[in-house]
Image (tube, grey):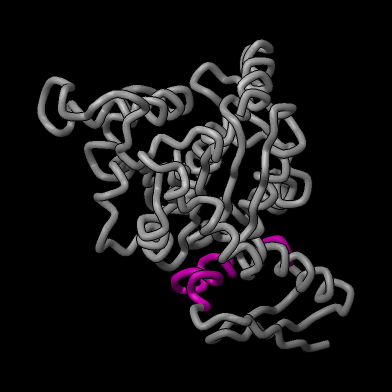
């Protein structure tokens, strides 16, 4: 039996590999078949049952490619060894995302975190909105670190608006970097849990991981990256639009925020919920709303949030 498998892509090399390297590795698991690849077509000849199995398994490999810049021989090995967890995360959301430096597994700890994980694998833009302590930013950074370690992206970009929560930026000591670092410290803290300090400094120095205030995003095209906008409730509509339109090819965007903690001079200027309302129905966009039941910090935090919400 002969069968032609047509790849639905304008870039077959991203699946078959340079010189069909990925295809050749894949074929080592089907020694009884004659396989050749040219352009976006794969010609398979041999036993019908084996061809059908080949086609089904290769479709799984193509599905993995949707979450990566390109495939490697390790992806083929993981596929046949049953080690790939991307499909588990995309469907169930409760598999291990990444491990901390101490070897502790990071995984979703409540139903809405699971929704967020699944939304990330099934969409290119995810909004995660809810009160402090629900793990929105931590899960977002875990997903970004996983993507970098799995070579799904080339870089991680983390950003926040430099809006004060009662303090004034100008009164802080030091140069611009010194003034801005306190706003970005929560992002450094989360990264420090998942990437060894020395390696993290290398990534930052080399630009593999970039942490910058939102204003620094203007004019850029962010491709091949996992990009996280934290504290998005402190952006206005213009800033949020500027950020979202930075999305380039092979990029994943995660926007996190708490609509009850707006530090702008006028709370009505916040663009987070307004922006979600404009794009929520677009294909490739997902929104997950957290509440006080999802809080994973100290048990008292949930009670504090409820008390303040009741007052509001």
Instruction: Looking at the picture, tell me which residue is in the foreground, 244 or 27.
Output: 244
Point out residue 288 in the picture as x, y percentages from the top left corner.
67, 47
Is 262 located above or below residue 277 in the figure? above
Q: Is residue 197 magenta?
A: no
Q: Look at 38% across and 40% down and name the residue there.
A: 264
What range of the chain is rendered magenta? Answer: 12-30
Instruction: Looking at the picture, tell me which residue is in the foreground, 176 or 312.
Output: 312
Point out residue 15 in the picture as x, y percentages from the top left corner.
55, 70
Is 288 located above or below residue 195 in the figure? below
Q: Look at 52% across and 40% down and name the residue there.
A: 257
Quarter occupied by residue 2: bottom right
Q: Is residue 236 visible?
A: yes
Drawn side of residue 45 relative to residue 133, left or right: right
Instruction: Looking at the picture, tell me which residue is in the foreground, 63 or 127.
Output: 127
Residue farthest right in this picture: 49
Quarter occupied by residue 192: top left
Is 307 located above or below residue 91 in the figure? above
Drawn side of residue 123 relative to residue 205, left or right: right
Q: Look at 64% across and 70% down and name the residue there.
A: 283
């Amino acid at each position: 039996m002969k069968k032609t498998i047509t790849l639905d892509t304008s870039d077959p090399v991203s699946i078959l590999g340079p010189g069909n390297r990925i295809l050749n590795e894949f074929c080592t698991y089907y020694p009884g078949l004659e396989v050749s690849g040219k352009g976006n077509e794969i010609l398979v000849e041999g036993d019908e049952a084996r061809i059908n199995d080949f086609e089904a398994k290769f479709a799984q490999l193509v599905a993995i490619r949707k979450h990566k810049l390109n495939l490697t021989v390790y992806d083929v090995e993981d596929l046949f060894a049953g080690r790939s967890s991307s499909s588990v995360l995309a469907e169930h959301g409760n598999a291990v995302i990444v491990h901390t430096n101490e070897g502790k597994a990071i995984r979703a700890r409540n139903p809405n975190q699971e929704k967020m994980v699944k939304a990330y694998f099934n969409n290119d833009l995810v909004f995660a909105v809810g009160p402090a302590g629900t793990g929105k930013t931590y899960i977002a950074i875990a997903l970004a670190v996983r993507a970098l370690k799995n070579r799904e992206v080339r870089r991680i970009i983390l950003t926040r608006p430099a809006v004060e929560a009662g303090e004034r930026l100008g009164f802080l000591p030091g140069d611009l970097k010194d003034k801005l670092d306190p706003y970005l410290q929560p992002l450094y803290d989360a990264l420090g849990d998942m990437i060894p300090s020395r390696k993290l400094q290398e990534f930052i120095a080399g630009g593999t991981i970039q942490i910058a205030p939102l204003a620094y995003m203007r004019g850029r095209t962010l491709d091949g990256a996992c990009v996280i906008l934290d504290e998005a409730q402190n952006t206005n509509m213009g800033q949020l639009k500027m950020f979202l339109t930075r999305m380039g090819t092979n990029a994943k965007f995660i926007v996190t925020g708490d609509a009850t903690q707006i530090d702008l001079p006028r709370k009505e200027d916040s663009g987070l919920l307004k922006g979600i309302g404009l794009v929520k129905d677009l294909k490739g966009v997902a929104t997950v709303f957290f509440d006080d039941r999802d809080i994973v910090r100290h048990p008292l935090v949930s009670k504090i949030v409820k008390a303040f919400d009741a007052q509001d």
